[in-house]
Amino acid sequence: MAPALAPDPQFKKDEKALCFHHELLYDAKVIDLKPIDPDDKKSGFQYKVHYKGWKNTWDDWVPEDRLRKLTQENRELANNLRHEVLAAQRAAKAPPAAGKKKPQGSARGSEERQMSVTAAGPRGQKRYRDQDLEKEEAFQTRRAVRIYMPDRLKSLLVDDWENVTKQLQLVQLPSSKPAGLILDEYFDYEKPRRRRGSAEADILEEVIAGLKEYFNKSLGRLLLYRFEREQFFDIHTRMESGTSDLAGKTLADIYGGEHLLRLFVSMPELIAQTNMDSQSVNRLKEELVGMLTWLSKEPQVNTFFASTYESPGQAYIDKVKSSV
């Protein structure tokens, strides 16, 4: 059998790219490359990069997974990550309003949901311009990682909240575009952009599987408004019935895009229960921001968030009120 061919480098000398330095993506240029292990042709490559606008003293050797191709999509990801960091810094600097109550989290029937994701995260880094970002010493004290939520998805979350809690309506279930299908479609979209057998490809698969598991386990505990719980009990009963059309299905096969967005908002509570290190949290954050960016574009935003809300009737409303 012929020996397996060594992988080709994904980036060439003098190629312009985007390079991660901790949480942010920076414009960079590959100025040199070499095998990670000269004695092992399958070990992959490392690249020496020069960051645009920075002195040569910042030139650095980085592994391949720190680099991203210079595409419009990755440029948008870089901008979203930067906006998220700036928003976190502004929020940290803003003094609390006198007498203003702290909003409740998303758990256990709360009718308030934050529009950004926070979780225990890493310390800061140095390559931030003074006019845009706070100084290194202050940045190192920041203890939260926020995930950028595109404005279009924020609007959908607000509309969803008003439909359920104010208009007393429910999403028609089962969804024609359930959360599991949405995640599978993102996987099919993103997979060809990852090199087969690479760590990037493995991470994508793990994140999709993890989000499905989180969705199924947290929906009844974290992702529902109080008005939806009677509907959830009915759905769960049908799932447990051997003769129902929902038998054998998971919650990710039944609930759709609106509830999937609520999962993204609830990620800080879920991540806080893990022992993920800073590097893993940063990597997960990148994957989630990329997914949210994709969801906010056409045709996804109109395809996956076109759910029909309907009034469940007065008998359902009375039952909810009597259970409070």
Image (cartoon, rainbow, N blue to C red):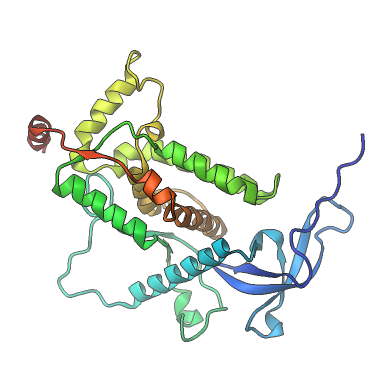
Q: Residue furthest right?
A: 2
Depth check, front residue: 244 or 120: 244
Q: Residue 317's x, y, as percent?
A: 10, 35
Q: Residue furthest top?
A: 243
Q: Is residue 172 above or below residue 68?
A: above
Specify whether 1 is left or right of 291. right
Depth check, front residue: 242 or 145: 242
Specify whether 227 is left or right of 278. left
Q: Residue 226's x, y, as percent?
A: 19, 41
Specify whether 123 is left or right of 307. right
Whether residue 139 is visible, yes or no, is yes
Specify whether 182 is left or right of 218. right
Whether residue 260 is visible, yes or no, is no
The residue positioned 86% from the left and 46% from the top of the image is 5
Q: Is residue 134 above or below residue 107?
A: below
Depth check, front residue: 93 or 202: 202
Instruction: Please identify the quarter of the rendering in which residue 221 is found.
Output: top left
The residue positioned 84% from the left and 50% from the top of the image is 6
Which image quarter holds the N terminus? top right
Q: Is residue 247 above or below residue 270?
A: above
Instruction: Please identify the quarter of the rendering in which residue 256 is found.
Output: top left
Depth check, front residue: 278 or 247: 247
The residue positioned 36% from the left and 53% from the top of the image is 265
Q: How many marks?
A: 0
Q: Residue 275's x, y, as percent?
A: 49, 51
Instruction: Please identify the quarter of the rendering in which residue 314 is found.
Output: top left
Q: Residue 167's x, y, as percent?
A: 14, 46
Which image quarter holds the C terminus? top left
Q: Is residue 24 above or below residue 243?
A: below
